[in-house]
Amino acid sequence: MKSTFKAIFLSIIAALSLWVINAAVNTFFYYDESFLQVLLFHNQEISFKLVAVGLLILGLFMARLFAMQNRTENAMREGEEKYRSLVESTEDSIYVVDRNYKYLFMNKKHLSRMGFSGDEYIGRAYSEFHLPYETNWFIEKANSVFSTGDSVQHEYKSLKDSSYFLLTLSPVKNSGGTIVAVTVISKDITERKSIEEKLKALSLTDELTGIYNRRGFFTLVEHQLKLSKRQKRGIFMLYADLDHLKEINDTFGHQEGDLALIETANILKDNFRESDIIARIGGDEFVVIPVGANGDNIETITLRLQKAVDIHNSKGNRRYKLSISAGIAYYNPLNPCSVDELLLQGDESMYEQKSLKQKS
């Protein structure tokens, strides 16, 4: 704005100066009239007055044009500075690659992550700094942006440090509307993924015992049944029930009943592998799918469980003894059944054993 006023002021001063100097020279050398008469009213000076006015108008126009150009340049400069400030201050990695997947730009965050200190990355290929699998994955995603012109988002796990990122890929177009590059904004979501995994684990885990809950069991067993069908290999399931839980609660209190459930879960965890599926599916009901078990060793597994219970009861002075009734169910891939039917089969088998224990 100051430059505009300065240009206008100089234009006015220049035009007036020429006008006054011309009138003074003419009064002194050519005319007998007064200076004011020559300056303002002499007919022979009209043409020069018009020239002076024209110069003044031209000066005003040029000043206006200069001011508009100056405002545009300032706006562009301010916009560029704000954009650069935003790009450099963000915690996200931002970079640009051309159609040959060569780097055109990296912000400070991505420079730091890639280990660069300056612009030595410019013109170097994405494949120089990433494994073939990662490069092929990136090219596939970038190609979809080049072909459709649409922005896309994908989650990505870095093989470099196992961090998770959310990548937003967007097209960069030239003045003719042709896509010439892709901008990538990479947001670190490692913490968010960790929270999601913890929440997922909580939704599948029994809060009291730390083993899978009913939802967790159904989630995992469905996969095992599909695997069984594909491999044509049967699955055995141990269905266990903690005997006399109601009596423990009524006699010693629910806190003691919870402890009995926790001890039962611990016995199961100690006697089965980490890869086996162990779950509490009801108040006092537990199921175990020993992955890879067959008919020859399932009986051995059952006897080993009973022995573990006996050892547990022999330790310390206990006000009651744990008792577990267990039945066996079998999933035949040649004659498949649902998970609910498999549980019903195990429940019936368990109650048969419970009845035999009560009679003995």
Image (tube, rainbow, N blue to C red):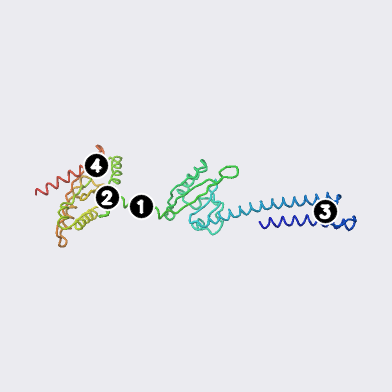
Which one is closest to the eye, mark 1 or mark 3? 3
Q: Position of residue 316 (x, y in %)?
A: 16, 62
Q: Amino acid at mark 2?
A: Asn
Q: Amino acid at mark 1?
A: Glu
Residue beneath disc 4? 340
Residue beneath disc 3? 40
Which one is closest to the eye, mark 3 or mark 4? 3
Q: Earlier in the sequence, mark 1 or mark 4?
A: 1
For the residues labelled 2 and 1, the Cα–Cα distance comes to 16 Å
**Mark 1 packing: few (<14 Cα in 10 Å), some, or many (20+)?**
few
Q: Position of residue 46 (x, y in %)?
A: 83, 49
Camera-side residue of 280 and 69:
69
Residue beneath disc 2? 213
Q: Quadrant of the N terminus?
A: bottom right
**Mark 4 packing: few (<14 Cα in 10 Å), some, or many (20+)?**
few
For the residues labelled 3 and 4, the Cα–Cα distance comes to 111 Å
Query: Of the numbered discs in the image, which one, if any, rests on residue 197?
Result: 1
Q: Amino acid at mark 3?
A: Leu
Q: Amino acid at mark 4?
A: Asp
For the residues labelled 1 and 3, the Cα–Cα distance comes to 90 Å
